[in-house]
């Protein structure tokens, strides 16, 4: 179901109420059509919030926003002395000063969430967040007008910006919550106040900021404390760490997984090419599902989405329809057959040890008896465990009978060391920069070979995919 209504309007008075800000200029009855943090795209009717990001500080773009016609701005109190101009009062420009502009963006989102009658699903986990979010939104939107996170808008800026798109036509919101430090999930959950909280799995991701896998477990568990008291936690019944969290929460627990204790299960799973077939067992009814995505991990994501659909009151037929209409987003096990005959599996969206292992296992099944090549980039934010985790990936590659292994990044040597320790021949490994890898690969690859490309987001592995496909189709 689509919607055409605009986001909820804001008055200056509401902005001050939501943020506990101080009005420096402008009128309390001024009305804004929405909120923006981008001075280049802001509309004259919108409120500009000067966010301090990793690269840019929005306070440096306040003048640009006003030139673009913005009639209202939120700035940090510690910048007000340098930025505020008395002529803004004459021009009737609303200026609100707050303690923390990023925090105030979240406060505005929390305000709108409380004032609209929308049911919220919040999804977190070490792997599969975005796919589960997309599947869940696809299922829920079979019956309800649904807002969902676009792309990976899953942090303290992205989640509020998503909620600020809510309007009175929306019945559900499906949000992805990411994190790389303790307390982040708690804050995001405070903002969105979930009716349903989903944890897909817990694995070794973001160890740099969280220290240990137990740290990851406690950080993900912050979601459970913030679910509404009458809400439900949808949890992976196949994950022992999540099961231990489930015993501590006071919220209702609804399990998904392959195990018999799960409320929503899958059985008779069959993988055929790029598709996965299974029987979805819901409380009281079962239905066959043809998922247009490869890999057992995709079935787990689908079960989480099905569990949300069931709690939302959807029928098995509606849930099946939502799942079968799912298409993986870019860079997530996308299979591209080239004119030259070789096949590229693009899984470049991101990488951590669990998702890398799942990708290699799925790749082994996809390629069958054809030659397989792995191009691996660094998995980031693993802290002290980085070298050991990269060696394990090399070891798994050799065990999976990868014919040729390419590695790039600071831990490339650790990957190839791991492979050699499991018997991979020295001549079947190659480390280098992405352009060197691409050149060597183009000269090596045969017409029936399969290539899996994967690495952390900032490694830019998609450039290798593009180069391969462009050459393969030339």
Image: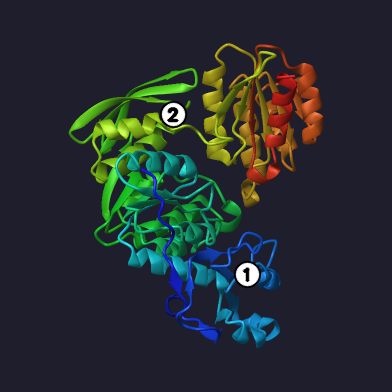
User: Marks 2 and 1, how far apart in space?
Assistant: 51 Å
Q: Quadrant of the N terminus?
A: top left
Which of the two labelled residues, at mark 2 and mark 1, occupies the earlier sequence position? 1
Q: Is residue 317 above or below residue 445?
A: below
Give the foreground label among 2 and 1: 1
Q: Nearer the viewer, residue 334 or 446?
A: 334
Q: Is residue 464 above or below residue 224?
A: above
Label 1, residues with CA under 10 Å away: few <14, some 14-19, many ≥20 = some
* SS label for mark 1: loop
Q: Is residue 239 visible?
A: no
Percent position (x, y) of residue 22? 52, 85
Q: Which mark is residue 296?
A: 2
Does residue 450 appear to the left or right of 166 in the view shown? right
Q: Residue at x 67, y 43 (%)?
A: 387
Q: Which mark is residue 403?
A: none
Residue named by callout 1: 69
Q: Nearer the viewer, residue 48 or 152?
A: 48
* Total numbered labels placed on residues in the image: 2
* SS label for mark 2: helix
Q: Is residue 234 above or below residue 468?
A: below
């Amino acid at each position: 179901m689509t919607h055409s209504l605009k986001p909820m309007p804001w008055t200056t008075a509401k902005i001050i109420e939501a943020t506990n800000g101080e009005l420096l200029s402008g009128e309390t009855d001024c009305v804004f059509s929405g909120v923006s943090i981008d001075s280049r795209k802001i509309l004259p009717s919108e409120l500009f919030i000067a966010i301090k990001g990793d690269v840019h500080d929005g306070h440096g773009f306040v003048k640009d926003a006003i030139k673009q016609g913005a009639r209202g701005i939120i700035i940090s109190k510690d910048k007000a002395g340098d930025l505020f101009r008395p002529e803004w009062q004459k021009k009737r420009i609303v200026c609100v000063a707050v303690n923390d502009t990023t925090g105030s963006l979240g406060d505005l989102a929390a305000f709108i969430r409380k004032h609209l009658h929308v049911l919220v699903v919040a999804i977190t986990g070490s792997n599969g967040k975005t796919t589960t979010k997309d599947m869940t939104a696809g299922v829920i939107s079979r019956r309800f007008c649904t807002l969902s996170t676009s792309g990976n808008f899953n942090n303290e800026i992205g989640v509020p910006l998503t909620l600020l798109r809510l309007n009175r036509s929306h019945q559900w919101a499906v949000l992805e919550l990411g994190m790389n430090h303790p307390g982040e999930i708690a804050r995001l959950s405070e903002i969105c106040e979930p009716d349903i909280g989903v944890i897909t799995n817990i694995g070794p991701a973001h160890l740099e900021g969280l220290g240990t896998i137990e740290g990851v477990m406690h950080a993900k568990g912050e979601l459970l404390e913030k679910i509404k008291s009458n809400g439900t936690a949808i949890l992976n019944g196949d994950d022992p760490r999540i099961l231990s969290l489930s015993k501590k929460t006071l919220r209702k627990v609804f399990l998904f997984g392959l195990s018999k204790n799960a409320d929503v299960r899958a059985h008779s799973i069959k993988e055929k090419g790029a598709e996965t077939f299974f029987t979805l067992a819901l409380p009281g009814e079962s239905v066959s599902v043809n998922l247009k995505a490869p890999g057992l991990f995709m079935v787990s994501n689908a079960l989480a989405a099905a569990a949300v659909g069931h709690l939302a009151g959807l029928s098995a037929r509606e849930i099946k329809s939502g799942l079968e209409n799912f298409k993986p987003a870019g860079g997530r096990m996308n299979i591209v057959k080239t004119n030259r005959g070789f096949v590229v599996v693009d899984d470049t969206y991101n990488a951590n040890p669990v998702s890398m292992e799942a990708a290699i296992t799925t790749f082994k099944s996809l390629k069958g008896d054809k030659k397989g090549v792995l191009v691996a980039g660094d998995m980031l934010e693993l802290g002290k465990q980085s070298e050991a985790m990269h060696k394990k990936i090399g070891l798994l590659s050799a065990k999976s009978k990868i014919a040729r292994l390419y590695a790039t990044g600071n831990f490339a040597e650790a990957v190839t060391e791991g492979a050699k320790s499991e018997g991979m021949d020295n001549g079947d490994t190659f480390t280098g920069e992405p352009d060197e890898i691409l050149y060597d690969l183009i000269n090596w690859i045969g017409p029936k070979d399969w290539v899996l490309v994967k690495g952390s987001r900032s490694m830019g592995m998609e450039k290798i995919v593009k180069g391969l496909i462009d050459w393969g189709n030339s």
